[in-house]
């Protein structure tokens, strides 16, 4: 017994001194146990991979027209594997346009959200950290933006600048990014401000301040990393709202300029043949629904995984 005691003591000490898992490691393990979140993540990764490899994967270009093949039905109607999902009113392959349109829809989903993150992050961190008049001034600006409907502003801005030099850049994408990103950041700013207000009085922030760290370093090195969990969840839910915003604007003719393919303007093109060839409107609608559900499942999974109270 006496010979075995030191070995047992060493083993027990080894277990006690093993480094604990970090918040992000625990969050990743919990996320992996959420099947719907993993399914959503796989769907997003698959869609992004297909979009990136569009020049290789797509059978045709997004604007290749074959006028002798107008309104060809899908393969299960014609038995012709040349055009798997058929062609539209000017002979463009529907499957190829779906693949190329995934690029536009995903870019429009991520870029405006990234701009909102920068705007809302800067306003929320500065407002919450400094407080006082700075906080009051920035939050009143956020209230003004919050009072204006974002989709209404996007429609007005797209209609007003669509035919200008600014509206014609990048096939209308630059105008679309601006109209979708200028509003919507105020909710993120309020979220980050609330996190900063609770964090700036913590002991580790007080210690950094006592050691003489400047405010910029304290905000960047100590406060920002501790606000990432709710911000990541908010961004995961913000991407589908941007995608559906682009689809809505393109559907009414104020989004991406033709002939650039996006799922939104494909819905508009397919509306004319909704009864004769419903595949042209059903295919982009299904793609939009799948990507929206994928981001929703991922957002729900991230919300549960990043909740420190979730220990199971």
Image (cartoon, grey):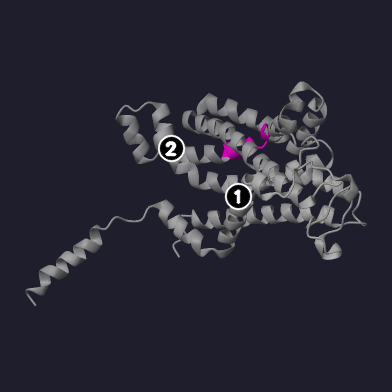
- Horizontal placement of 117 versus 6: left or right? right
Q: Confirm whether the magenta stretch covers residue 250.
A: no
Q: Quadrant of residue 147?
A: top right
Q: Which mark is residue 264?
A: none
* Residue under the point 42% across and 57% down: 26
Which secondary structure lies at badge 2? Answer: helix
Q: Position of residue 20 (x, y in %)?
A: 32, 56
Q: Position of residue 285 (x, y in %)?
A: 78, 53
Q: Where is residue 176 in the image (x, y as percent from the top left)?
A: 72, 34
Q: Confirm whether the magenta stretch covers residue 186.
A: yes
* Residue under the point 74% across and 32% down: 171
* Residue under the point 76% across and 22% down: 165
Q: How many labels does the image show?
A: 2
Q: Distance between the residues labelled 2 and 1?
A: 34 Å
Q: In which quarter of the image is the C terminus?
A: bottom left
Vertical placement of 73 versus 236: above or below? below
Q: In which quarter of the image is the N terminus?
A: bottom left
Q: Quadrant of residue 139?
A: top right
Q: Is residue 200 visible?
A: no
Residue behind mark 1 = 49
Residue found at the very far bottom of the displayed protein: 1
Residue found at the very far left of the displayed protein: 2
Q: Can residue 55 be seen in this view?
A: yes
* Residue under the point 59% across and 39% down: 188
Vertical placement of 177 versus 48: above or below? above
The magenta segment is 181-190
Residue behind mark 2 = 223
Which secondary structure lies at badge 1? Answer: helix
- Horizontal placement of 141 versus 92: left or right? left
Q: Is the magenta stretch mostly helix, strand or loop?
A: helix
């Amino acid at each position: 017994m006496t010979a075995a005691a030191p070995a047992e003591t060493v083993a027990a000490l080894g277990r006690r001194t093993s480094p604990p898992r970090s918040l992000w490691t625990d969050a990743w393990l919990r996320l992996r146990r959420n099947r719907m979140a993993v399914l959503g993540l796989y769907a997003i990764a698959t869609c992004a991979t297909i979009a990136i490899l569009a020049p290789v994967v797509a059978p045709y270009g997004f604007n290749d027209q074959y006028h002798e093949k107008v309104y060809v039905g899908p393969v299960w109607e014609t038995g012709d594997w040349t055009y798997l999902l058929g062609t539209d009113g000017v002979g463009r392959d529907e499957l190829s346009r779906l693949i190329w349109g995934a690029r536009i829809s995903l870019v429009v989903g991520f870029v405006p959200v990234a701009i909102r993150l920068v705007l809302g992050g800067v306003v929320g961190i500065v407002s919450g950290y400094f407080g006082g008049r700075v906080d009051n001034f920035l939050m009143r600006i956020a209230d003004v933006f919050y009072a204006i409907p974002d989709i209404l502003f996007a429609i007005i801005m797209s209609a007003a600048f669509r035919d200008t030099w600014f509206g014609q850049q990048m096939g209308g994408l630059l105008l679309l990014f601006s109209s979708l990103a200028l509003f919507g950041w105020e909710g993120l700013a309020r979220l980050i401000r609330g996190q900063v207000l609770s964090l700036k009085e913590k002991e580790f922030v007080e210690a950094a301040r006592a050691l003489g760290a400047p405010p910029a370093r304290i905000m960047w090195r100590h406060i920002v990393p501790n606000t990432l969990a709710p911000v990541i969840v908010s961004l995961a839910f913000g991407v589908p709202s941007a995608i559906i915003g682009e689809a809505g604007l393109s559907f009414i003719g104020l989004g991406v300029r033709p002939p650039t393919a996006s799922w939104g303007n494909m819905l508009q093109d397919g509306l004319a043949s909704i009864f004769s060839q419903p595949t042209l409107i059903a295919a982009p609608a299904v793609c939009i629904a799948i990507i929206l559900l994928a981001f929703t499942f991922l957002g729900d999974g991230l919300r549960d995984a990043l909740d420190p109270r979730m220990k199971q």
